[in-house]
Amino acid sequence: MDEVSTPALIIDHDKMQKNIRTMVKFAKENNVRLRPHVKTHKSPIIGQMQLDAGASGICVARVGEAEIFAKHGFDDILIANQVVEMNQIKRLANLNKKSLVRACVDSEKNALDLNKAALEEGLVLEVVIEVDVGLGRNGVKPGEPALKFADFLKKQKGLKIVGLQGYEGHLISVHDNDLRKKQTEECMKLLVDTRDLLNDNGFNIDYLTASNSGTYMFSAKYKGITELQPGTYVFNDEHHFRIVPEFNIAATVLGTITNIPGKRLYTMDVGLKAATNDNGNPVFKNYPKCRIRVMTEEHSIFRAGPNDTFEIGQKIELIPSHICTTANLYDHFTVIKDDEIFARWDIPARGKNY
Ligand SMILES: Cc1ncc(COP(=O)(O)O)c(C=O)c1O
């Protein structure tokens, strides 16, 4: 670690591999496909490891990410999100000339724009109807509104409906296991009932994609769900670890102590440009009593535990509160294996949020 210039994003290779294998094993045992959301790492190297382990494709959030992964040979990509802006719709159509890149759709306006771009390129774009199962972010309402929307989509000659997506992302903050299970099942019921309604009305939908790293264990077991799309599990983070400790913390941010501004107070070089605080401040890997007090652009100031002492220049590892927004800040991962630096992997899709 002494050789690493900080702040740095450190990946423990073996812990990450174990997370990848744990999720694949779970999906296989529960007879669902696994399509990891690569917005967490934005790295084709790690995406390929997930495919090699048994995942059946990947999810991305943005066209820019899809472009990077398609360039690296990924040819089964779901943009688990809407592609609305015209420039991005054209790029989506263009991607589909070589790879299968599906997108979610939830509005007539967007469907018309996607259809126009598809017809102009002489393509049929495969789309997934997103159903709002409770998050209240994207998606048509379940039941009759989804059926009405599907009927509208069916008339668009440039589009083909291939399935339904329901993302129960709001349940990640439900810490009580029984309650999270109950609420996940309620969300999945909305999705499966909507599929039944569509199929009773002439559709033939089997593909239902859903879930995340905090609810995967419940949605996988709900009859009718065919695919999981978790992302964070690959590295895990402080926020998710509280509900899914079966996944190792495989990513940390390494920082250096730069000053000792007061008694038990330390400044380090990990600010908001090196670790986000959107789910709370990062925590200390080996010093549970240390607490960050302030995070600014380039620094954080923390109060050490009563028995913790540090020197200027000393390196310390932090566990990010939210790894997805933290990884997006870095150009590369420093990968550690058996306590040695094993590799430096670029993060080519980092910042490709457009
Ligand atoms: C649509 C969708 N699916 C899946 C995920 C993965 O969730 P997680 O990172 O909690 O596993 C996300 C995360 O933002 C998402 O937006």
Image: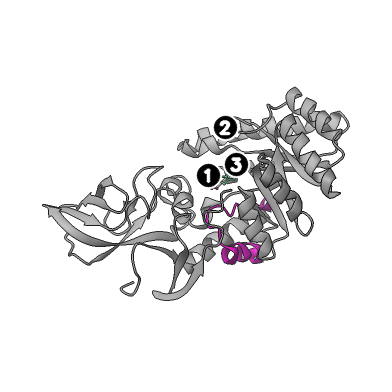
Position of residue 16 in the picture relative to residue 153 (left or right)? left
Q: Please, what is the three-letter code of the amino acid marked with disc 2?
A: Leu
Return the disc, 1 or 2, that comes first in the chain's sequence: 2
Position of residue 50 in the picture relative to residue 249 (left or right)? right
**Which residue appears at 46% of the width and 36% of the height?**
176
Quarter of image, res 103 = top right
Question: Of circles 1 and 2, which is in front?
Answer: 2
Disc 1 crowd, CA 10 A, few/some/many (<14, 14-19, 20+): many
Quarter of image, res 191 = top right
Return the disc, 2 or 3, that comes first in the chain's sequence: 2
Disc 2 crowd, CA 10 A, few/some/many (<14, 14-19, 20+): some
Location of the N terminus (image quadrant): bottom left
* Tag 2 and tag 3, C-beta contact below 8 Å: no
Q: Position of residue 136 (x, y in %)?
A: 58, 29
The image quadrant where one finds ligand 1 is top right
Question: Of circles 1 and 3, which is in front?
Answer: 1
Residue occupied by mark 3: 218
Q: Nearer the viewer, residue 151 or 21?
A: 151
Quarter of image, res 2 = bottom left
Give, as a single range, the part of the protein colored magenta.
29-54
Q: Position of residue 325 (x, y in %)?
A: 46, 49
Position of residue 294 in the picture relative to residue 260 (left or right)? right
Q: Position of residue 235 (x, y in %)?
A: 48, 57
- Labelled disc at residue 135: 2
Disc 3 crowd, CA 10 A, few/some/many (<14, 14-19, 20+): some
Position of residue 18 in the picture relative to residue 294 (left or right)? right
**Which residue appears at 47% of the width and 65% of the height?**
332
Q: Please, what is the three-letter code of the amino acid marked with disc 3?
A: Phe
Q: Please, what is the three-letter code of the amino acid marked with disc 1?
A: Gly
Vertical placement of residue 170 versus 124, above or below: above
Question: Of circles 2 and 3, which is in front?
Answer: 2
